[in-house]
Image (cartoon, rainbow, N blue to C red):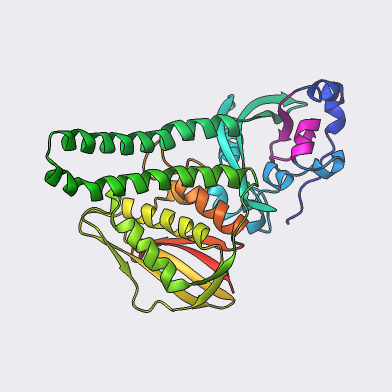
Amino acid sequence: MAQIEHVNTLGNFDHIKHVVDAFSHIFYIVNDQRQIVLSNIRFKKMADSHKLEEVLGLRTGDALGCLNAKYSPYGCGSAHECKGCGALATITKAFNTNAKVTSEAQITLEDNPGHQLSLEITATPFVHNRRRYLYVSAIDIEEKQRKEIMEKIFFHDVLNLMTSMQGCLEIMESMGAEGRERFFPRLKDISNQLMDEINAQHELVKAENNQLVPNVMLTDSLQVIEDVKRKMSTSKVAEEKAIVLDSISDKLTVKTDTLLLSRVLINMTKNALEASGKGESIVLKAQKISGGVRFSVHNNAVIPDQVRFNIFKRSVTTKGKGHGLGTYSMRLLGERYLNGQVGFSTDKKTGTDFFIDIPA
């Protein structure tokens, strides 16, 4: 990491240190280089640092162990991935406008890529000894965010499925036995989707609480993508679209949790289908790579710049408010529980590929 200027201003804030340590929320002060010059106990505990000098001079992402801060030798705020950082945007805007700024930020931790800090950050400018600083406070909003997601995504999707089921049953009531038989496959499909939605949310809650136990077994790579295609082909989002298995896919033996891997690939497939228009195709592929197998899902759309930097964060989406768990759960399940590497590439010429690399 590049040399950060020496911070020698802590003494100027000693008179308020005992006050900020009494705060129940995270609090720290940064100078105009975004370096921390004072922090309270709550911040140091979140940073897993109990010695004050370990935090002083660092920037927010460096102190908290942000994954993106490690992508550049210059640390927090300098990596390509930092362009979408809510914490950086809040602090920068407060300095640029000389006004109080509040916004949400999600920070992915380097030592636990499946976990994110969800914070509401407020930055307030002030001047001390002719130098500009910010008071920065942060509130943990993870529980609030989880409840909002459950209401806007889970309950919304379940209610839609239940409405479809109710509609089928009402039509069947007015038919004879012979006519009703035509609706049984549709009812079965809705029932399967309903169970799948409930199971997916149950898995996600257990995964976030570190309660998920992978069931590792030997499985066939082609069988995995064939099963994903079969399950997704009957979904509503696949209507008038095609799911294709790449002809150069490799038949390989993989040691992994098949159900969790399928869940990751189903989310990738759903994401690709939602990004595709009528008449378009998406492509599933399994291919041998050095050290393992890459499973990928391709579509022709391009992810916008404002989204791609935060693509795996909770509630980030290209599809409007009320979506966003799909990409988040890809990384949570794929990296924390399958020991894989989840990523994507997007380009105007080639489209978008989401992938997960599973070690051999």
* Residue visible at 34% across and 56% down in the picture: 232
Q: Nearer the viewer, residue 187 or 47?
A: 187
Horizontal and vertical percent position of residue 129: 78, 26
Which image quadrant is residue 350 in? Answer: bottom left
Q: Is residue 210 above or below residue 265?
A: above
Horizontal and vertical percent position of residue 64: 71, 44
**Which quarter of the rendered picture does the C terminus lie within?**
bottom right
* Residue visible at 55% across and 58% down in the picture: 334
Which image quadrant is residue 167 in? Answer: top left
* Residue visible at 37% across and 53% down in the picture: 270
Q: Is residue 37 magenta?
A: yes
* Residue visible at 83% across and 26% down in the picture: 13
Q: Nearer the viewer, residue 149 or 234?
A: 234
Horizontal and vertical percent position of residue 239: 23, 53
Q: Is residue 217 magenta?
A: no
The magenta segment? 24-46
**Which quarter of the rendered picture does the N terminus lie within?**
bottom right
Which image quadrant is residue 170 in? Answer: top left
Horizontal and vertical percent position of residue 134: 68, 29
Q: Residue furthest front?
A: 177
